[in-house]
Amino acid sequence: VAERPTIYDVARLAGVTPSTVSRALARPGRVSAATAERIRLVATELGYRATPQARAQTTTRTKMIAFVIADITNPFAFELIRGAEHAAASAGYITVISDTQESVAGERLRIDRILPSVDGVVLATSRMSDSAIRMTAKQRPTVVLNRKIVDVPSVVTDNPRGMRRAAEHLRELGHRTITYLPGPEASWADGMRWRALLEASHELDLKARRIGPCRPTVDAGVEASQAVADSGTTAVIAYNDLLAIGLIRGLQRLGVRVPDDVSVIGFDDILISRLVTPELTTVAAPLRKMGETAVQNLIGYIGGATSRTEAPVVLPTRLVVRASTTRYRSPRSRVRPPLS
Amino acid sequence: VAERPTIYDVARLAGVTPSTVSRALARPGRVSAATAERIRLVATELGYRATPQARAQTTTRTKMIAFVIADITNPFAFELIRGAEHAAASAGYITVISDTQESVAGERLRIDRILPSVDGVVLATSRMSDSAIRMTAKQRPTVVLNRKIVDVPSVVTDNPRGMRRAAEHLRELGHRTITYLPGPEASWADGMRWRALLEASHELDLKARRIGPCRPTVDAGVEASQAVADSGTTAVIAYNDLLAIGLIRGLQRLGVRVPDDVSVIGFDDILISRLVTPELTTVAAPLRKMGETAVQNLIGYIGGATSRTEAPVVLPTRLVVRASTTRYRSPRSRVRPPLS
DNA sequence: TTGAAAGCGCTAACAG
DNA sequence: CTGTTAGCGCTTTCAA
């Protein structure tokens, strides 16, 4: 309702032209010290700050970056965001976050709307097609998180290694068959993980199977628990922690004990995983670092930097053994409540 | 790097002037059906979409709203965001989220940068001063969540009622002294809750005391647990669920059983509260609804609507009794591990 | 129904 | 060092 001061207001009060004001504020060196000082005074007096969006029209520099994520509800997003935010802040950028709610159309829409006012974009867990992403990448510097796309810089975690460690862990505990509880089919990481499990199983002489796909949520985990229980498996690796936690809850309700009857491993190591009972064994991703790295690289590209042909940055994972996995015991009869 | 099509491109290809294109896309009625159709065709063909930020220069209508939150890491934020997002979407708006990381300066900065490209702002859990918020409210329609400010529309929950219910619940269980574990001092809700507890205690003939303040995090809850254990209290109400959960963890580690030795109640009813052991008794806030209401009202104001003098919208809370509270038993000697 | 012109707030290129 | 000019992409008068 009230007007914010424009560069013209400042110019008038400082007795100079707008261009001088602009210079004084952006490149102080190119203006006489006295004038610059006077302008700065008037500016702070009026509370003037350049409108980044108007500025962007000519410079494409808003000092803002967009962080687009499919599901902000996933705690997985937290650390990512915090990392991004941190890296952005230390470079003088601010981050705007957009939640696409797992919708491709929504993602497109939001990106379109936001793009013009940011200098670059981090696409975390994008659900768009590779070509759509490349499209975006042509309009503004773009970094993709958790996914590999030709010609678009990306940051991923070492899924194969993580899955391998998880499988080894279960094998050491005596398990011989592993069930994978997959995430959404559109997820790049999901494909990677399943493939990695197949390979690891082969090399370690394990049997792998899958029950799914599932949405990457607690509820979906609960829903999947019946099928998992029925399958008589003794070890499951879930697409992510949320799913794993849901599964554990579901199993417990069915009278299946975790880890005594079934060992469960998740992916990500989100905060909650340390809070549930039993505490979750999980393949920890360096979430925060991922966010940071993505933004640092992005800002590099914005700063005119390097070629886009670079290989993806691969960040290491780490198996965190907690209480949801234990030694194999041959399946025993399990108490199950009557179906409701 | 590549250029997105401008209105000029569309105009040229459609054989009309930019102004006609603009009209055709915004107010189709004011353009001949044939021309409009042709323009629309070219536009979709080219994938043209008006740059909201450029448009905003003349209209102040970007169909975007900003959702500013102090700590996106708090699961409390989720449902709020989802609610907001939902209400925004159904009105054709998109939401950009900004995490201020509990910093006043950060909040100012972000708001300043983002304001010019949005039609309105929801300030959730703002840490800024009332006057600073009023300032913002003068520049763009603003709705405040979880806080009351004269002349600024707001949406709050019925803290007094919720606290009252919590106190009643504990009283019914036989507790006579209640310890409040406060949140950040800058939090408006915290003040409300403590005051409400004092009142309720008075009326219900309970003793109330407080140990704090604390950051509203799990870690802070863990840290507070020693003091709580030492105090010998049998019932505590925490500022929010995160704090409550941390407290429970901490107490458990100290050998204090929850709820057997100490009953704990939280605020908010975030997702995790159902996932921890014991499941948390909590004062549930209609988080989603809050987000929705805030945005609906905001959009109302954007649409030129009502006077700002309205009283805050107060949404009801609800006590959700789960497993972290139980009947009072006189304190017994508690096992404590030696100090490390 | 359509075009021409002016301007939103800001910056950059080009004189002085 | 500073002013002038032009223009970013879009919309909105004002005429035609």
Image (tube, coloured by chain):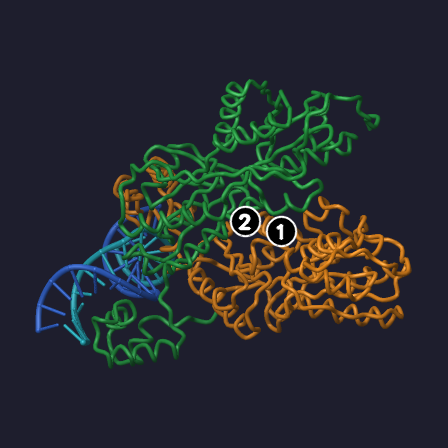
Chain colours: A green, B orange, C blue, D cyan
Left or right of B209 in this view: A235:
left
Type of amino acid at the residue the image marks with label 2: Phe
Residue A316 visible in image: yes
Identify which residue, A72 or B298, lies in the foreground. Answer: A72
Residue A6 position in % (x across, y down): 35, 70
Q: Residue at x 39, y 79 (%)?
A: A45
Type of amino acid at the residue the image marks with label 1: Pro
Q: Residue at x 46, y 47 (%)?
A: A289
Residue A253 position in % (x across, y down): 77, 33
Residue A113 position in % (x across, y down): 42, 48
Q: Residue at x 48, y 30 (%)?
A: A160
Q: Are marks 1 and 2 in contact (CB under 8 Å)?
A: no
Provide the chain ID for the residue under circle 1: B
Residue A55, compared with residue B44, is above or below; it is below
Element carrying mark 2:
helix
Left or right of A155 in this view: B238:
right
Q: Check chain identity for marks 1 and 2: say if they share one.
A: no
Residue B273 position in % (x across, y down): 71, 49
Task: Say the numbered circle drawn on residue A78.
Answer: 2
Task: Say the numbered circle drawn on residue B159.
Answer: none
Determine the image quadrant of residue B327.
Answer: bottom right
Give the class, few, some or many, for how many residues have Cα within 10 Å of label 2's Cα (few <14, many ≥20).
Answer: many
Element carrying mark 1:
loop
Residue A81, compared with residue A228, is above or below; it is below
Residue B23 visible in image: no
Question: In this figure, which residue is indicated by the disc labeled 1?
Answer: B75
Left or right of A107 in this view: A5:
left
Identify which residue, B55 or B3, lies in the foreground. Answer: B3
* On-image quarter of the C terminus of chain A: top right
Gap between marks 1 and 2 measured at Cα: 9 Å
Provide the chain ID for the residue under circle 2: A
